[in-house]
Image: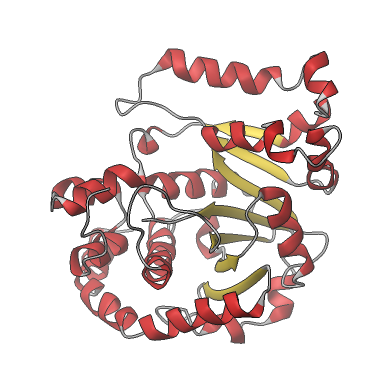
Amino acid sequence: MGDAESDSYSVNMKARVGQLARLLPTLESSVQTFVNSKSNFTRIATNDSQSPWPGFASGETRSQEQIQNARKLFILDSSYNPPSKAHAALALSALHSVSSTESTRLLLLFGVSNADKGFKPAAFHHRLAMMILFAQDLRERSKNFEFADIPIDIGLTSAAYYTDKSPAISESGVYADECTHVHMIGYDTLIRFLNPKYYEKFDPPLSALDPYFDAGHQIRVLLRANEDGNDEQELKAQKAYITKLAVADSTSRELGFKREWAQQIVSMEDIHAAGISSTRIREAVFLHKWEAVERLVTPGVFAWLHQHHIYDEPT
């Protein structure tokens, strides 16, 4: 994005935030309607080159045929409390891998069943507002790349586990059956994803992952670095863990892990995500350390946090 475009984007930010603030009752109603529906997944918004800002109303009017054409769906699943530059690094790193010939979409997925612990969470409608701003920030940052026109959907799910989330998305009929899901997660989440204790109802436990990998779905893992981005020993250990998956020792196989699944697990690094956490952002907002907050979140999210008193209690 050129300097003139960047300046224009910044100047118009106040208007964007104000316009979205007026939609808060609609966002709150959308969450409540979804919760009451007992559905497992819904798409409530799309931000693409056809969308007027903020793109919220387009969720119900976007051409279903256009959405059904997607053959790869990148899924960034988070509590977005708040969205951060680590989320942006994860999304942009994955989108950089997209071939210009692929029909691709990005889904920002928000789980309404997430149990926030140890702090007062931002209300769900505020998180949705920040997700919409975050989606616009991503599109602004990607203007000069091949993937600039990739549509960004915002969805809600009541499913708590990845083994339930992909089926919920597929069964909704929003995307084509042959659409490949690529969940983008952090290294810590990968450890939980492959932890047999979450699948005790299955025998062997990791057989719970069979439908996910058999469908051709993939995992992209962002390796975790320290704040200085130079923790080579930690990154080396993480890479070794992922490499070892392809070997699948006897213990892993007894638990139900299949070595061919390793081909569907791809790791990536990004120094821009080092040292960023939602906890750190919430603490900085509470203490009104706005320079620190601005370094940790994208411009639209920063503007929202600065205007709304979301995290007015210590984490």
Q: How is the image coloured?
A: secondary structure
- Give the side of residue 255 with respect to residue 136, left or right: right
32 shown above or below 178: below
Q: Quadrant of residue 128?
A: bottom left
- Give the side of residue 137 with respect to residue 95, left or right: left
49 shown above or below 57: above
Q: Write the residue at 43% across / 85% down.
A: 26
Q: Write the residue at 22% across / 69% down.
A: 308
User: Is residue 153 or residue 22 the one in the foreground?
Assistant: 22
User: Is residue 50 or residue 251 the one in the foreground?
Assistant: 251
- Give the side of residue 315 with respect to residue 249, left or right: left
Residue 120 picture location, percent across and down = 32, 57
Can residue 127 be seen here?
Answer: yes
Q: Write the residue at 44% across / 53% down.
A: 116
**Quarter of the image with the N terminus in it:** bottom left
Q: Quadrant of residue 174?
A: bottom right
For the image, the number of numbered tags is 0
42 shown above or below 23: above
Can residue 50 be seen here?
Answer: no
- Give the side of residue 90 with respect to residue 173, left or right: left
Residue 195 picture location, percent across and down = 67, 32
User: Is residue 36 or residue 290 the one in the foreground?
Assistant: 36
Q: Write the residue at 23% across / 47% down.
A: 283
Residue 110 picture location, percent across and down = 53, 61
Residue 29 picture location, percent across and down = 47, 84
